[in-house]
Image (cartoon, grey):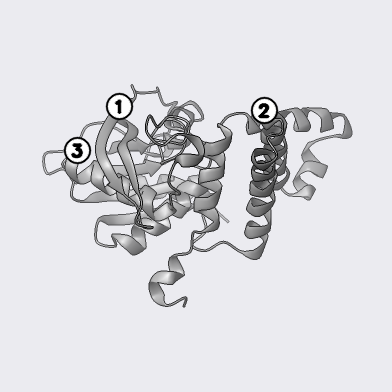
Amino acid sequence: MPSVLTLLCLLFSVTLHAADTPPLQIANLGDFSLENGEVIQDATLAYRTAGTLNADRTNAILFPTWFTGNTEDLFSSDAVGAVDTSRFFLIAVDALANGVSISPSTSAHQAQQEFPQVSIGDMVHSQHQLLTEVLGITHLHAVMGISMGGMQTYEWVTTYPDFMERAVPIVGSPRLASYDLLLWTAELTALEQALDCECNEATARELAGMISQLALYSPDFHARQDPHDQGATLIADGRAGGMTLAIHDRVAQLHAMIGHDISTSFNDD
C-alpha cells in the first residue's frame, strides 16, 4: 500500500525539499461572530505564505495547524514539504486558540476563562474570512491538514464545498470515534480539574501531554521501536509536549475537537 506521503507526491507532482520558515503575518478580523452566538473581540488570525499566487488567484493551498501546533511547527517539521511552492501558493494558517492567532492566552479583552468557546467550524469560518476579505482569494486549489488540521479540512468540505478543487485530510476525523472521545475527554478532565481546584497547572499540562503521547503511536509500535530503557525518554517527551500550549488554549482546542461532527450537516447520516 502506498504511503500517505507518496499519495501526496502523486497528487501535487511535487519535489520534496526542506521548507524554510516564512515570516509570520497577522490579519485583523475585527469582532468575529462564532457559531454559538458569542463574539471574539478584536480577533486576529496568524498565517505564513510560501510560493507565488498566480494571476487568476487559483493556485492557493490552505494548510491549517494540528492540535496544539502552530505554523512554525508546520515548516520546521517539513509537514508542508509535500506542497510544491514553485507551482502552488501555500497558506499555512494558525488555528484559533493555538496561542498565536487569537486565543485565551493572548486576548486583551476576553482573557483565559473569559474567552468564548470556539468550534472547528469557527476555525474554518475565520480562515474563509482571511482568504476572501484579506487575501482576496475566492477559490482554492486544495485544503489539506493533519490531525485537527484534517478535522478542519473535513469542515471545509461540508461548509464551503465549492471553494476548493481538492481536499486532503490526513489522520483527521469527520466525527470522533468513541476512542477519540475517551482520549480527549480524559485529557480535558485532567486540565479542567487542575483549573477548578487551582492546582499546579504545570503538572496538569504535563499529564495532558503524556496522555497525548500515549495515544500517538500503538503499543505494538513502541514494543518494536523503543526498548525498555527508552521509557524515561518517552515520559519526558510527553511532559514536554504538554508544555507547548497554555492551559486555557489547550482546553479551548480540546472542546473544539470533542464537539466536531460534520454529520450534523446531514442529519447525522
Query: For mark 1, what is the residue?
Result: 25
Q: Position of residue 146 (x, y in %)?
A: 49, 46
Q: Position of residue 9 (x, y in %)?
A: 42, 44
For image coordinates 42% across by 39% down, the residue present is: 82
Residue type (three-letter) at the residue carrying disc 3: Val
Q: Is residue 164 visible?
A: yes
Judging from the image, what secondary structure is the residue with disc 3 in?
Answer: helix
Q: Quadrant of the N terminus?
A: bottom right
| Left or right: 62 in relation to 117 | left
Q: Position of residue 197 (x, y in %)?
A: 70, 39
Between 22 and 8, the one nearer to me in the picture: 22
Query: For mark 3, what is the residue?
Result: 134
Q: Say few, some or many: other residues with alpha carbon within 10 Å of mark 2 (under 14 / 14 to 19 / 20 or more).
A: some
Q: Earlier in the sequence, mark 2 or mark 1?
A: 1
| Left or right: 235 in relation to 27 | right
Judging from the image, what secondary structure is the residue with disc 2 in?
Answer: helix
Judging from the image, what secondary structure is the residue with disc 1 in?
Answer: strand
| Left or right: 230 in relation to 105 | right
Q: CA distance from mark 3 to mark 1?
A: 11 Å
For image coordinates 51% across by 44% down, the residue present is: 252
Q: Earlier in the sequence, mark 3 or mark 2?
A: 3
| Left or right: 67 in relation to 139 | right
Q: Position of residue 110 (x, y in %)?
A: 41, 37
**Residue that protrudes farthest toward the right in the picture:** 228
Query: For mark 2, what is the residue?
Result: 240
